[in-house]
Amino acid sequence: MKIISGSSNKPLAEKIAEKLHSNLSPVESHTFPDGEHRVQLQESVVEEDVVIVQSTSSPVDQNYMELFFLIDGARRSGARSITVVMPYFGYQRQDHVFRSGEAVSLEVVIKILESLTVNRLISFDLHTIRIPDLFHIPVSHLSAAPLFEKKIREFGDDVVLVSPDMGGVRRVKIIADALGGLPYLATVKDRDLESGVIQISSIEGDTKKLRKTAVIIDDMISSGKTMVESAKLLRKYGVERIFAFATHAVFSEDAPAILEKSDMEEIYVTDTVFVPKEKQFEKLEVLTISDMIANELATSH
Ligand code: R5P
């Protein structure tokens, strides 16, 4: 097996390689003055099972293009199979037409990946469970839930789980069940699609389920506003300790700053998206999913 990393999340790719007692296969990556990109595999991959690790987080389009070129380079160089490990899948939220005239961007990237003859995809906590069905290649849809459950157990029994919006209730219920039937509810989110303004002003479900400690769980944190507004409402209801868990630390705009000064005590994310030093903050803890990916690769090759 040859493991190749794109440039979006090399620290994760290195951890995966280390856990598989391997090294990253070297790649030369060059950007021309006009912004075009060139990649070159530096090692033979003839008849090899090639694994390409790339999160398509920001800069999303640049990371996608680099991934496409790496896949093409490996295919042209005689790889036997190509597995793409995309821990964070860019454009996954654009999975249908929200307003007429829009593109279904997720389907566009799936078509490109499949036309490049990728054999298999491994990804994490996709925005909806329907997404793997849109592919015509095998998709391993892994989840950070077991990592979160382990941590949440440390908070004791007086805990309620919270989905910050109705779309995430299924995810939260799975974790509540795994933790022996913890109570759960949701805060109700309204997002203006044009302005992006988020409002969270009510709770769906029985507020008697609220406990001293609340744990908000989501698939991703982008601007941070969903988490911050959900926590604000829980505080209004008298919740004393608020923790947050999200798989993907997209961290756009001034997310780190607003999360740090929010009502939340600690914010747990994973390394599906690389969090550079300038985006780290005191309340943040990053859990690694490298073991889970290494196990998946080890058992399927
Ligand atoms: C939306 O449906 C997602 O599950 C997240 O709640 C959302 O992407 C978080 O975005 P932000 O951090 O910008 O509020």
Image (tube, rainbow, N blue to C red):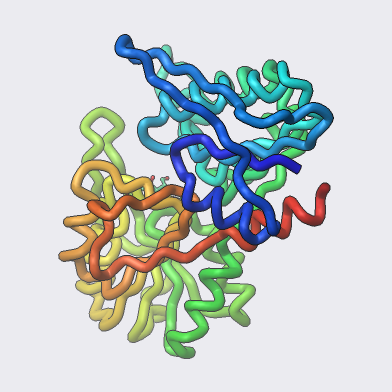
Q: Nearer the viewer, residue 108 or 61?
A: 61
Q: Is residue 102 left or right of residue 143?
A: left
Q: Is residue 188 above or below residue 210?
A: above
Q: Is residue 166 above or below residue 64?
A: below
Observer able to see residue 267: yes
Q: Where on the picture, by quarter, is residue 80?
A: top right
Give the residue at x 31% y 58%.
Answer: 227
Q: Is residue 178 left or right of residue 65?
A: right
* Residue 213 x, y percent position in the rendering: 36, 82
Q: Residue furthest front?
A: 43
Observer able to see residue 132: no
Q: Residue furthest top?
A: 34
Give the residue at x 51% y 58%.
Answer: 169
* Residue 186 x, y percent position in the rendering: 41, 62
Q: Nearer the viewer, residue 121 or 77?
A: 77
* Residue 109 x, y percent position in the rendering: 56, 23
Q: Nearer the viewer, residue 156 or 177?
A: 156
* Residue 236 x, y percent position in the rendering: 20, 72
Give the residue at x 74% y 30%.
Answer: 45
Q: How many marks?
A: 0
Give the residue at x 31% y 48%.
Answer: 251
Image quarter hosting the N terminus: top right
Q: Where on the picture, by quarter, is residue 60?
A: top left
Q: Is residue 261 above or below residue 258?
A: below
Q: Is residue 15 above or below residue 262?
A: above
Q: Is residue 267 left or right of residue 90?
A: left
